[in-house]
Image (cartoon, grey):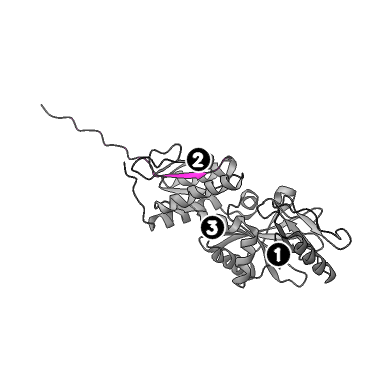
């Protein structure tokens, strides 16, 4: 009796954990770009991950994964208490410790989500960034404000952890003789306001992937001075000039980021300054004006790094 040949086993596609609580447009673009390369994207909430150190094995469980993922893409880190945020970052650190490529990793997220540390690292690396002060003592913060106003400068009070232009207050001599209450749980982050080179408020978002600036857009505010798209600013195509390219790449390199959205402003004299560096940047607005498939480029860089990254196999 002739034995029938066994059907070939179908090898499961390698899978990327996409950390997000709101997949939306960005998640769909990443999954499509991964599928084009034979990979699978699976959405995972950091809130649902847990450590189980009661037996052998990696000790970390991600819902939807029987073993460790082949890689992880960080699209969002939830807010919460200090303990909660530390816990979410612990998951990212643990994955890297286990040999899983995390894009951006926990260290990059920590450096970029904290505006004070971002400013410190840029300043010490010689990357042009506005003068900033991070102060716990309200009396010292008041002295900084008084000194800056007396010198003819304005300040912007920002949440130490914040995004999308929320919670910003512009402090000028005529409006703010005293310091408002901090928006960072007792920590004042104050950044010198840099007047722009145009009558309408505008800045540039430069997208860096794999240490290389790949595209840029100009953001303009129809009214007011805040240029975040979430606050009503509009997006326009922009040339990726050499100074924007060099400054954005220097900022991403300084913060050791695999990918980044770097916000750059030109002052009245045309000099460029790095205002912020975003470790989990959105790119929908940029995609609409740049004609560049950013999800495909991000996935290509992630897989390039994965091929060269050693990985610990799950045990048990």
Magenta-colored stretch includes residue 16? yes
Query: Considering the numbered disc 1 on the image, is that residue within a helix, a strand or a loop?
Result: strand
Magenta residues span 4-21
Instruction: Say which residue label 1 marks.
Output: 133
If you read the primary sequence from the N terminus, does the residue marked by circle 3 or circle 2 appear first?
A: 2
Q: Position of residue 181 (x, y in %)?
A: 78, 53
Q: Residue furthest right?
A: 174
* Residue underneath mark 2: 44
Choose mark 2 or mark 1, whichever is in front.
1
Residue picked out by circle 3? 108
Q: Residues within 10 Å of mark 2 (few under 14, many from 20)?
A: many
Q: Is residue 279 left or right of residue 188?
A: left
Residue 72 in percent (x, y) is at 47, 48
Identify the secondary structure beneath mark 3. Answer: helix
**Badges 2 and 1: C-beta atoms under 8 Å apart?**
no
Q: Quadrant of the C terminus?
A: top left
Residue found 33% across the figure and 48% down from its top: 313
Q: Position of residue 190 (x, y in %)?
A: 73, 61
Quarter of the image where one finds residue 4: top left
Instruction: Evaluate whether residue 299 shows in this view.
Output: yes
* In the displayed structure image, the side of residue 9 where residue 41 appears, left or right: right
């Amino acid at each position: 009796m002739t034995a029938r040949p066994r059907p070939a086993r179908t090898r499961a596609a390698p899978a990327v954990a996409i950390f997000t609580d709101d997949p939306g447009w960005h998640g769909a673009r990443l999954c499509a770009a991964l599928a084009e390369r034979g990979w699978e994207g699976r959405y995972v909430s950091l809130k649902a991950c847990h450590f189980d150190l009661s037996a052998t094995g990696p000790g970390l469980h991600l819902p939807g994964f029987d073993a460790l993922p082949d890689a992880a893409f960080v699209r969002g880190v939830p807010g919460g208490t200090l303990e909660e945020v530390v816990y979410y970052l612990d998951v990212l650190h643990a994955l890297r410790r286990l040999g899983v490529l995390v894009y951006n990793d926990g260290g990059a997220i920590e450096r970029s989500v904290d505006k004070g540390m971002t400013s410190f690292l840029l300043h010490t690396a010689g990357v042009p960034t506005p003068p900033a002060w991070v102060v716990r003592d309200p009396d010292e913060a008041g002295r900084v404000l008084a000194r800056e106003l007396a010198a003819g400068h304005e300040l912007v009070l920002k949440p130490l952890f914040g995004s999308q232009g929320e919670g910003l207050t512009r402090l000028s001599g005529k409006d703010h003789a005293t310091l408002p209450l901090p928006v960072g749980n007792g920590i004042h982050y104050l950044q010198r306001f840099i007047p722009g080179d145009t009558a309408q408020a505008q800045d540039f978002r430069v997208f860096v992937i794999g240490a290389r600036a790949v595209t840029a857009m100009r953001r303009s505010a129809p009214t007011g001075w805040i240029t975040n798209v979430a606050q009503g600013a509009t997006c326009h195509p922009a040339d990726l000039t050499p100074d924007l390219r060099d400054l954005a790449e220097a900022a991403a390199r300084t913060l050791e980021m695999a990918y980044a959205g770097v916000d750059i402003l030109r002052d009245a004299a045309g000099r460029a300054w790095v205002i912020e560096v975003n470790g989990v940047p959105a790119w929908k607005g940029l995609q609409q004006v740049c004609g560049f498939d950013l999800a495909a480029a991000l996935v290509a860089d992630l897989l390039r790094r994965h091929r060269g990254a050693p990985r610990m196999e799950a045990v048990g």
